[in-house]
Image (cartoon, helix red, strand yellow):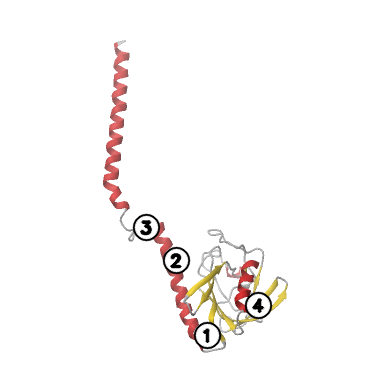
Amino acid sequence: MTRRIFMKIAGKILIVTGILLFAISAFGYFLWYKPKFNEPAGDKPFSFEKSVNNFEAKTIARIRQKALLAKGFVNSGKFDKEICFLIDMRLPSGNNRFFVYNLERDSVEITGLVTHGSGSENGTDELEFSNVPNSYKTSLGKYKMGKSYYGKFGLAYKLYGLDNSNSKAFDRFIVLHGHSCVPNDETAPFPICVSLGCPTVSPAFLSTLQNYINQTQASILLWIYY
């Protein structure tokens, strides 16, 4: 009987001791670590916020760089001086990487998803690009937006390559067109469908682009870069 009472008392002492140790540990944890939660991420690894900011900052930097060069290019030729289309192939296909850029306001007006060529994929995160016919790869460079027509995929726009890296675009039948496999909203981290080399967008986004194209008599510059 006495032994049973002793065991009960010992058990209660252990429980109380455990609670006290937990309380002391928790207090010490927050006393030591909480001030560090408010410190800037700095160069600490696994900082998600820092990664997102770097991702966006690099994207914006590339857009601004191309937009600045595009301004000089359109001013020297018969291109629309207000709007250009920029496609950043450095971004994953599940992210919006087609940018309608207002050169006069220095701002992105709208964004949308766009495919790359199936031949550009090589099993890594990096893409490959080519100007070779039947390579099914995306060609980097500046394009002149041509006239619209209705083909296999409905509304489409002819594209004329203006650089050595995309000079065969017209002969390769590289055009801007829509396809139902391209969604209207971002799918990242999941990729979207691929094309045979054409920059392909969703039908709804193509309709929006059509409104911009129809508002000008001059050709619009489309620039695919990496």
Sequence-wise, the earlier of marks 1 and 2 is 2
Q: Position of residue 222 (x, y in %)?
A: 56, 78
Residue sitting at 61 percent across and 68 percent down? Answer: 205
Look at discs 4 and 3 and give the one toward the viewer: 4
Residue sitting at 28 percent across and 24 percent down? Answer: 13
11 relative to 148, above or below? above
Q: Which residue carries the number 3 mark?
A: 45
**Residue type at numbered disc 1:** Val
Q: Position of residue 22 (x, y in %)?
A: 31, 35
Look at discs 1 and 2 and give the one toward the viewer: 1
* Residue 74, numbered label: 1
Q: Which residue carries the number 4 mark?
A: 157
**Residue type at numbered disc 3:** Pro
Structural crowding at the residue carrying mark 4, measured as other residues with C-alpha within 10 Å and reported as few (<14), some (14–19) or many (≥20): many
**Residue type at numbered disc 2:** Glu
Residue sitting at 46 percent across and 76 percent down? Answer: 106
Asked if residue 53 shows in the view, the reply is: yes
Mark 1 in CB contact with mark 3 (< 8 angstroms): no
Mark 3 in CB contact with mark 2 (< 8 angstroms): no
Structural crowding at the residue carrying mark 2, measured as other residues with C-alpha within 10 Å and reported as few (<14), some (14–19) or many (≥20): few
* Residue 66, numbered label: none
Label 1: state its secondary structure: helix
Sequence-wise, the earlier of marks 1 and 3 is 3
**Residue type at numbered disc 4:** Tyr
- Quadrant of the image occupied by residue 160: bottom right
* Residue 56, numbered label: 2
Sequence-wise, the earlier of marks 3 and 2 is 3
Look at discs 1 and 3 and give the one toward the viewer: 1
